[in-house]
Amino acid sequence: MTMPRPSAPTRIRDVLWRGGLRVAYSLQRLYWFVFRPEQRGVYVAVWHRGRLLVVKLSYRSAATIPCGAVKRGEPRASAAARELAEEVGIDVRPEALRFVGEVVNHSGYLKDHCDVFELDLSEEPAVRVDRREVVRAAFRTPAEILAGPLSPVVRAYLTELPAGRARAASD
C-alpha cells in the first residue's frame, strides 16, 4: 500500500521530530547506563498469511515489531493493544491478543521484561505509520526477517519462544 507523499512543511516537521526522537533515545540510553533500571514492555506479533508485520523505528537501526512500555497500573494486554494502535494504526481489543511468552532483554543497560502477544489476521490490515517514530511497516516472512538486523526480543521470539519458533519453521 502506497501512502501519499506529504507536503514539504510536513516533511520538514517529520525530519525534526525524528531528530528529536534520536536525541531523546540517546539520553534515555545514558539514563539506563547510569541507573540500570528494569521495565515491563510489550511486543505484538501481527501475522497475516505466514508473514509477520515488522516496523522500522526512526531512532533504532534494527527492525522490530510494534512494541512499547507498559504504563504504571496498565494491564499488559491493554498496553499491547495501545501500542499496536499508536505505532501502526491497527485497533483491536486486548482480548483479541494471545499471550505467547516473556523474553528478558538485557541490551542497552536496561533489563526489559517483554511480554510477547500474537494477533492473527485473515485480512491484511491498512497499516498507518506516522513517519516520525515509525518510518516503515511491512509484512515479511520469518526467513526474510531473520536474515537482517533485528531487535533481540523479536529474534528471541522467532528462535526461542515455542510459538514464534513454530511459525518460523513453517516458513
Image (cartoon, rainbow, N blue to C red):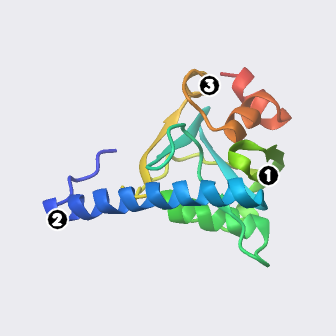
Q: Are marks 1 and 3 in contact (CB under 8 Å)?
A: no
Q: Secondary structure at mark 3?
A: helix
The circle drawn on residue 111 is: 1
Marks 2 and 3, the one that precedes in the sequence: 2
Q: For residue 67, say whether it is visible.
A: no
Residue 7 pos. (x, y %)? 16, 61
Name the residue type under label 2. Answer: Pro
Q: For residue 50, say whether it is visible.
A: yes
Marks 1 and 3, the one that precedes in the sequence: 1
Measure the C-alpha gap from mark 2 to mark 3: 36 Å
Marks 2 and 1, the one that precedes in the sequence: 2
Farthest bottom residue in view: 73
- Picture layout, residue 77 above or below residue 102: below
Find disc 3 in the rendering and name its residue. Answer: 146
For the N terminus, which image quadrant? top left
Residue 106 pos. (x, y %)? 77, 44
Measure the C-alpha gap from mark 2 to mark 1: 39 Å
Q: How many marks?
A: 3
The circle drawn on residue 9 is: 2
- Picture layout, residue 161 above or below residue 8: above
Residue at position x 60%, y 63% from top?
83
Farthest front residue in view: 34
